[in-house]
Amino acid sequence: MNIFHLILLISGFGLIAVYEIPQMAKEHHWRDLMAFSIVLLAAFILSLLMFMRIDVPNPMKLVEAVVRSLRKVSLNLIR
């Protein structure tokens, strides 16, 4: 792990936050700000885990499970 790469990672996410958040707060887009903050935080955590070479589970497995469940429910509702 290179400290320079860690600083770049943190700086990149920091710059995104500094660029986006003040405008959303100024225009009182609170829901957008909350959603943006959650997605940005999740992306930062995943990036940090990958940087630390921690095995991160594939998020597509969760998405596939949710879609499969919704498909079963919708097919049962149609019948």
Image: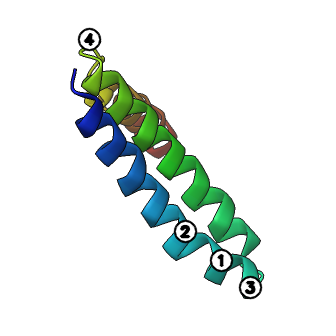
Residue ID for mark 1: 22
Circle 3 Cα neighbour tier, 10 Å, few/some/many (<14 / 14–19 / ≥20): few
Using the image, tell me which numbered label, if any, was put on residue 71: none
Q: Quadrant of residue 10?
A: top left
Q: Secondary structure at mark 2?
A: helix
Measured as percent of width and height from the top left, residue 53 is found at 23, 15
Name the kind of residue labelled 2 in the image: Val
Gap between marks 3 and 2, in whole Å?
A: 13 Å
The mark closer to the camera, 2 or 4, is: 2
Gap between marks 4 and 3, in whole Å?
A: 39 Å
Q: Earlier in the sequence, mark 4 or mark 3?
A: 3
Residue ID for mark 3: 26
Q: Secondary structure at mark 4?
A: loop
Q: Quadrant of residue 1?
A: top left
Name the kind of residue labelled 3 in the image: Lys
Where, quadrant-wise, is the C terminus in this rendering? top left
Image point (21%, 27%), residue name: 2
Gap between marks 4 and 1, in whole Å?
A: 34 Å
In the image, residue 32 sits, relative to residue 47, either above or below, namely: below
